[in-house]
Image (cartoon, helix red, strand yellow):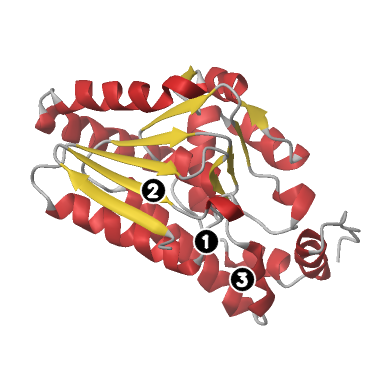
Amino acid sequence: MSETIFQIDPPFAVLTFNRPEARNAMTWAMYDALLAACEEVDRHPQVRVFILKGAGGKAFVSGTDISQFRSFRTPQDAIDYEKKISVVLGRLASVTRPTITQVEGFATGAGCGIVATCDLSVATIDSQIGIPIARTLGNVASSGTFARIVNLIGPARAKEMIFTGRLFSASEAQAMGLINRVVPKESIESEVMEMARQIAANAPLTIRATKEMTKRLMEARNPEQGDADLIEMCYMSADFKEGVDAFLNKRKPQWTGA
């Protein structure tokens, strides 16, 4: 079974993250597929809207597949990983077509990052969103991802999200500006498609210019800073190894701050 499904049916392109048995946790191949989908969207002149969703109805994306972190040995492994995430999400941010996330269930870690990167998001009432790394793994979000979240919900809310590690409900996420609409589970497909149809019927250059203008304003407010020292501090720590082991063995981590 393919881990992603990409379809173009003009004026729409749809990427489905297709690992429902793992709550659509992202493998390296899935990140590569997201990057490739962005390229295809921009190459296809008839695509007006790019929709991203998760298979199975229980999760949009529940972060990166944690088992992949077992291979990390050096600071460069961690820096390269966060750089890869920054490259992929940066490319998603620069897609010239409007992007919509269809969020059902969990959008955590990288899933939250994807939601924050896309232009618009529609979520089901039962959805939960956040970055619980302080509670689970003890790693750190890249400055690019964190900047996008700060731009959307403000620094105090962004720090609350990370510091507490709790997941926010769809209604809380909507109130903060992270989600545009919250709808019943049974109607999310039709709600997303109706939004996409409304956008596709409008002037594409106006939309493109507005998207690029917003991107430039946000980048001016929060330019991405160097973060290699912070990535190394977290990913090379005993706490991160403990967090990964605890997560994979379904136990509570014992933090030491080292």
**N-term mark: 1 or 2:** 2
Amino acid type at mark 3: Gln
Q: Which mark is residue 16?
A: 2
Q: Is residue 72 above or below residue 156?
A: below
Q: Is residue 214 above or below residue 44?
A: above
Residue pictured at 28% horizontal, 21% vertical: 194
Residue indicated by mark 1: 226
Name the element at disc 1: loop
Q: In the figure, is residue 75 to the left or right of 202? A: right
Residue indicated by mark 3: 68
**N-term mark: 3 or 1:** 3
Gap in Å between the C-alphas at discs 3 and 2? 21 Å
Q: Which mark is residue 139?
A: none
Gap in Å between the C-alphas at discs 3 and 1? 24 Å
- Please rate how many residues cluster around mark 1, counting C-alpha atoms within 10 Å: few if below 14, some from 14 to 19, many from 20: few
Residue furthest bottom as drawn: 73
- Please rate how many residues cluster around mark 3, counting C-alpha atoms within 10 Å: few if below 14, some from 14 to 19, many from 20: few
Estimate the x, y position of residue 233 in percent, counting from the top left.
71, 67
